[in-house]
Amino acid sequence: MEQGVTMNNKQRIDILTSYKDNPMVHPLTCGNNSLHNNLVPVEENKKAILKCLDCDYTQSLDDEFIKMLREYDKALRKILEKYKIMVKELNNENTSNS
Ligand SMILES: [Zn+2]
């Protein structure tokens, strides 16, 4: 996806879903009550929005923000992958030394 190219709603929802499922990010919480379940991305009135399933709260998002979430999600996933590899290597070293 190039800079400045508009996204369609499927792409927006894919980005939001990936972000939502990333265990390292701050969750997207309901603006009415943070104890509600995390917001879910849905398409409504031809727009990709975040919605609370526990009340009527919705959050509209502009593309700039969605792109920021995408970069953040991607960067954190890279860090997590790297970390898993490091832990694995460390475990291998420990086993071979013992
Ligand atoms: Zn809510």
Image (cartoon, grey):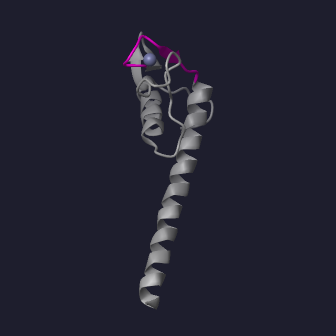
Quadrant assignment for ligand 1: top left
Q: Position of residue 70 (x, y in %)?
A: 54, 38
What secondary structure characterizes most of the magenta part?
loop
Q: Nearer the viewer, residue 28 or 36?
A: 36
Q: Is residue 71 left or right of residue 15?
A: right
Q: Is residue 54 magenta?
A: yes
Q: Position of residue 89 (x, y in %)?
A: 48, 75
Please state the extent of the stretch shown in magenta in the rendering.
52-62
Q: Position of residue 38 (x, y in %)?
A: 43, 28
Q: Position of residue 31 (x, y in %)?
A: 53, 18
Point 39% across, 21% down: residue: 42
Point 47% across, 35% down: residue: 15
Q: Is residue 15 magenta?
A: no
**Residue 26 placement: quadrant:** top right
**Residue 20 placement: quadrant:** top left
Q: Nearer the viewer, residue 61 or 8?
A: 61
